[in-house]
Every structure is written in C-alpha cells, then in structure tokens.
Image: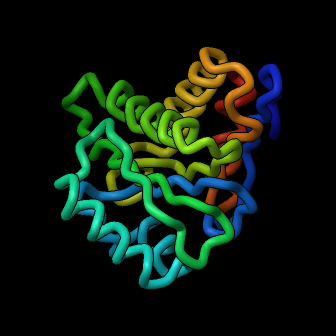
Amino acid sequence: MELVFGTTRVVALAGDLTAQAVDVVVNAANVELRHGGGVAAAIARAAGPSLQAASDAWVAEHGPLREGDAAVTDAGALTADLVVHVAGPVYDPERDDNAARLAAAVVAALDATADSGRRTVAFPAISAGIYGYPRDRATRVLVTAVIDWVAAHPGVLDEVRLVGFDDGAAADFGRALTDR
C-alpha cells in the first residue's frame, strides 16, 4: 500500500526493518537505550556492537531518553546512516493519552530525521510489541501522525516506510493508510 502526499511517498510493507534501504531506521527503544528485546534487539543484532556503544554514549551525555524525545546514533553495520531511537508509551488501558504519547514519539522521530538532513525513514509499529499497545490501534496512530507531519512539512522527506515484521502488521499499516 502506498500514498503520495506532495512529493513524499508513505508506504506500508512487510519486511525486515533492519534491511530497509533508507537513510534512517527508527528504533522502538526503552529509555535507557538498552537494546535487549523486540525491535531494538533486532536492530542491535543487525547493526553490531557499535550501536549499543553509541547508545550508551548518548545516555551518558544526555541521560535517559524521555518519552516524546528522540536520540540519534550512527547505524553501525545497517545500510541506513542513522538510527533514531524513540521511547513509545507502555500501553495502559486506564489512560486516555496513549494516542497522544505515541504520536509524540512518531513526531520526535520525524523531526530528528528532518533535522539530520536525511530524506528517507523506516518505522516499525512502535509500542505494539512488548509495550502492549494493540497493534491495529498503534498503526492507526502512527499513520495519522506521519500523514499530519508530512502535510505540515511538505517536501522535507522523500519517503516514509511503515514496515510490518509480518503480513499482519503490514496489513494493519495498509488499512490505516487506506482509511486516511
């Protein structure tokens, strides 16, 4: 599934996030940038040990990553130039601000990508794994945040990839794009 907004393509696909031929890969990180599970572990394995070293250096300099902020590191052995780390929210059905918190992480990643001068970025379904955000809801929030950001920043990015690790996740991204 693909939509074009001005000069920016927004694409939903199934695949390996770590193998995407993009400038920036977004990592669904924890606040300490310890890449031990989920998407973060997959990125760390593919990037090699230099990613964890760069992440440790970032935390030593800036402190723990705050929700709604982004940390930028080199991408190690990935084909991407950079990894933008964001800490999405742990889903809490008792809170009414889950969507706003997730959207803030998406916007932080897009802002960091633009600030780096890079033009292409790939996202996973942030918070939809071990953080428990229902995937269909998370992908809708993510797509809405991406489209709103692209509309407010025409021509800044060439492509945003929404990468599902399997066909089901890709279909959730695709449905969210279609429903927009």
Q: Quadrant of residue 118?
A: top right
Residue at left 52%, top 49%? 125
Residue at left 49%, top 34%? 111
Of 132 and 19, nearer the camera is 19
Quadrant of image for the C terminus = top right
| Residue 20 spot, x, y in % from top left | 71, 62
| Residue 159 spot, x, y in % from top left | 74, 40
Q: Is residue 161 visible?
A: no
Residue at left 33%, top 75%? 36
Of 81 and 16, nearer the camera is 81
| Residue 123 spot, x, y in % from top left | 58, 49
In the picture provided, is 179 more to the left or to the right than 9?
Answer: left
Quadrant of image for the N terminus = top right
For this orientation, the residue located farthest to the top is 152
Report the label total.
0
In the picture provided, is 97 more to the left or to the right than 140?
Answer: left
Q: Quadrant of residue 81?
A: bottom right
In the picture provided, is 85 more to the left or to the right than 81?
Answer: left
Residue at left 43%, top 30%? 103
In the picture provided, is 45 more to the left or to the right than 10?
Answer: left
| Residue 155 spot, x, y in % from top left | 74, 25
26 is higher (above) or lower (below) than 149: below
168 is higher (above) or lower (below) than 158: below
Q: Is residue 17 visible?
A: yes
Please, which colouring scheme is shown? rainbow
53 is higher (above) or lower (below) than 3: below
